[in-house]
Image: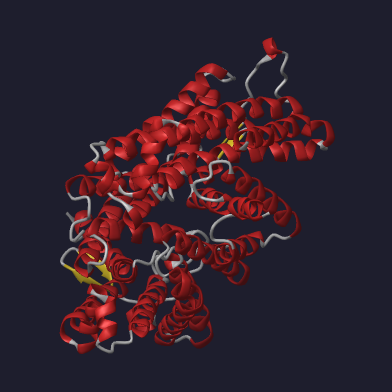
Amino acid sequence: MKDRKSILRIATVLVLLCLAPLFLPSYYTGLLTLILIYAIFAMSLDILQGYTGLASLGHAAFLGTAAYIVAIINVKVFHGPHFAIELLAGVLSAGIVAAIVGLIVLRNTGTYLLMILLASSMMLWGIAFKWRSLTGGDDGLPGIARPNLAFMHWNLHNTTDFYFFVLLFFVIAALLMYLVVRSSFGHTLLGIRESETRMTALGYNVWLQKYIAFIVSGIFAGLAGVMLVYYNGFVSPSELHLVTSAEVLMMVILGGVGTLFGPAIGAGIIILIKNFVSAYTEHWMIILGALYMATIMLAPRGVYRLFKRSEKRG
Amino acid sequence: MAFVLTQTINGIVFGMLLFLLAAGLTLMLGTMRIVNLAHGSFYLLGGYIGYTVAQRTHNFLLACLAGLLSIAILGVLTYKTVLEKRFAKETLAQVLLTFGMLLIISDVCRWIWGGNPLAIPKPEMLQGTIYLGSIVVPLYRLAVIIIGVVILLFLWWFQEKTKYGAIVRAGVDDAEMAQGIGINISLVKTLVFSMGALLAGLAGVIGGPFVGLSVGLDIEILLLAIVVVIIGGMGSLRGALVGALLIGLIDSFGKSLLPELSIFTLFAAMVVVLALKPSGLFGTR
């Protein structure tokens, strides 16, 4: 029964997502595209945060690295879109950064790990900020062309076509991540979250499992980065900044840590609020800051869980 | 040779400033397990308040006092209203609460003091320079080193030689037991947190004349302080001192020798330390 219910729910969401561009004005279709991109990003962090129990304040490192690699290939190497190469290079580069950073930091846990990840990602920000000749420094790299998929009858400069392009990748990524957390590997991760010592005693190589989870999470964050750079047509150091890392962490917490689909909802809420607030006041940072504080004080378990709980009661 | 000496002195001066910040941060982290992402904001806000007071009164000492007192009060308020009750043990909640504060303080600062970089004028007494052998050193920078050393000695004396220091250490080692023998742990923790905030506010004013005050400095200085704590090890004052001097020197030489990749040299230092000793140079865990 439970399975049929959740399949029905997922199907409904998918149908709604497919029909959305028919009803929404093109501005909101664009906004929904951005939400899907951040949903991939937030779900990838939940693999670490919710399923492995590794708190991270440096997840922007993977998003930003992939974005910069795609941008550099697009603007400086080929002077035009080469989708397959860019996608592969972007996702791989995020995986490689995760593999390198993970090698250094994963011996640590908890608060210390959180700080090290924060510092590592901000170092990448610093490099992007200072290395003008390659990254354009503070100004970023503009003029990134969207992929040319004319052979699939897609014109990605069209908002609706681009929306379906991102939706396709969102569905693939969400499905893959769902399979990861449901697999025996995913259950091992849950075991590590609950008790590392017990998993070690059971004969698991805890470090290796965490390392793999770290890389998998980085790769999906990289995919979000690739999509984001096409969406914006532009990349700047803020993609690597602590503010981005904290934002995605907020999406995960708001949506519900360890629920995988909850963070996607969290992404939607944050993007919408940011969009509306910044349209009305230039002091949106005050509002956003107050919102972060209020969320933690009022709904520390996330809205997805609130929703689930009321359902169980009813 | 003159180049090396000048950069070394600059590095030590900056290191002393970082020590003031990192000492508070490492105490909050190591002794209370509280992650305070608003620590850089405390620094910046303290500096801005000091700037305004210095503008009005032309008295640097008053500026320092205003900066450190206002931030100490802000620290008490932050700890009492936001962090203490429900979130004393939830790292993630602390992270986002203090990050929310970071955003708010950053926007408020931009609102009040504008987006252009400001600098606090040096006190008149310390405007000159002196010759150390072949190099010229601004008096103010020497004064910063002296202030840093005095605070360092005070902190050491307080922690190791006084009854209150013993109480803090007791609270750290076993909070429940300390409470059981009649120590007001809540008060101790509030004092430690506000002391850390006070040092950050003071650092903001002291750094005002040579680091300046600008938008985004809150996060930059927070990053440096965090790297110092990572290198030194959480909770260790000695670690904070060694880490701060190391980062100060690396920053000073890195910026003059490899300006495009200066931040990379900091990263390299962090990686080397973590590879050799994952808990930091003086970390106990």
Q: Can you see residue B33?
A: yes
Residue lying furthest front in this view?
Answer: A1
- Residue A46 location (% of width, % of height): 49, 43
B221 relative to A105, above or below = below
A291 lies left or right of A32: left
Q: Quadrant of the C terminus of chain B?
A: bottom left
- Residue A291 location (% of width, % of height): 62, 62
| The quadrant where residue B34 appears | bottom left
Residue, x 46% and y 63% (percent of image)? B218
Q: How is the image coloured?
A: secondary structure
Residue lying furthest top in this view?
Answer: A151
Q: Can you see residue A140?
A: no
Q: Nearer the viewer, residue B246 or B175?
A: B175
- Residue A200 location (% of width, % of height): 24, 42
Q: Quadrant of the N terminus of chain B?
A: bottom left
- Residue A52 location (% of width, % of height): 39, 44
